[in-house]
Image: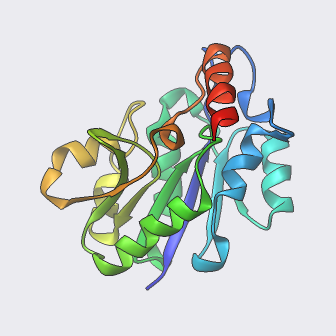
Amino acid sequence: MTVGCVILAAGNAARFGENKLLTPFRGKRLIQWAFDAVPAERLGPVCVVTQYDAVSELAAACGFSVIRNDSPELGLSRSVVLGTRTLKNCCDGLIFLVADQPLLQRSTVAALLDRFAERPDKIVVPSAGERQGNPCVFPAACFPELETITGDRGGKQIIRRHPERVETVETAPEELSDVDTLADLQKILYKAKKL
């Protein structure tokens, strides 16, 4: 069974005020933490969907393919659609990672893949208590729906539509924290010091 990986790194970061993915965080750029969380040896193709030349260069240096998103104003869904269309014919499942969760651990991504290997008909998501987050693994049966989503909500639209298909993997709540603002970055830095 082949699972492809799509790293979603095309957002405009309007609330942050600049390209947050290149912001330093604990000695690395924010995007590098996302790349380092990918257990590439366990995956099929790994693609980074982005509008940024600098992110494209960093992705290529990691050996990842790049999909150019020239319409990021269409929201997160545009990147999900581009990634799905690119990989759907060579994968049995797709895991989607957002690029702004610097505390996400590679072991957590591996645990999601393990659960999907056990339940390949399920949508596998990480959870901390009642809160669900990213990354999410979708089976091939969901690819047609992934190709039709719109707006800025990504695959969560499908998860809400099919709660009976969702399988959760418990993880630490800080791993689900993402960076939308400078204040978020400071909060996550504080959480990281406590780990």
Identify which residue is drawn at 40% across, 42% down: 133
Quadrant position of the C terminus in the picture: top right
Q: Is residue 92 above or below residue 163?
A: below
Quadrant position of the N terminus in the picture: bottom left
Q: What is the quadrant of residue 21 in the picture?
A: top right
Identify which residue is drawn at 54% across, 51% down: 97
Closer to the camera in the image, 10 or 187: 187
Q: Position of residue 27 (x, y in %)?
A: 87, 39
Closer to the camera in the image, 98 or 106: 106
Q: Position of residue 14 (x, y in %)?
A: 62, 16
Question: Is residue 88 at least partly visible in the picture?
Answer: no
Q: Residue furthest left?
A: 164
Residue 90 placement, left or right of 101: left
Q: Is residue 25 above or below residue 79?
A: above
How many numbered circles are shown? 0
Q: What is the quadrant of residue 18 in the picture?
A: top right
Q: Position of residue 66 (x, y in %)?
A: 71, 57
Residue 194 placement, left or right of 169: right
Q: Position of residue 104 (x, y in %)?
A: 58, 48
Closer to the camera in the image, 191 or 123: 191
Identify which residue is drawn at 83% across, 51% down: 58
Q: Residue furthest bottom?
A: 1
Question: Is residue 96 at least partly visible in the picture?
Answer: yes
Closer to the camera in the image, 175 or 13: 175
Q: Is residue 193 above or below residue 79?
A: above
Identify which residue is drawn at 46% across, 46% down: 172
What colour scheme was applied to this rendering of the protein? rainbow
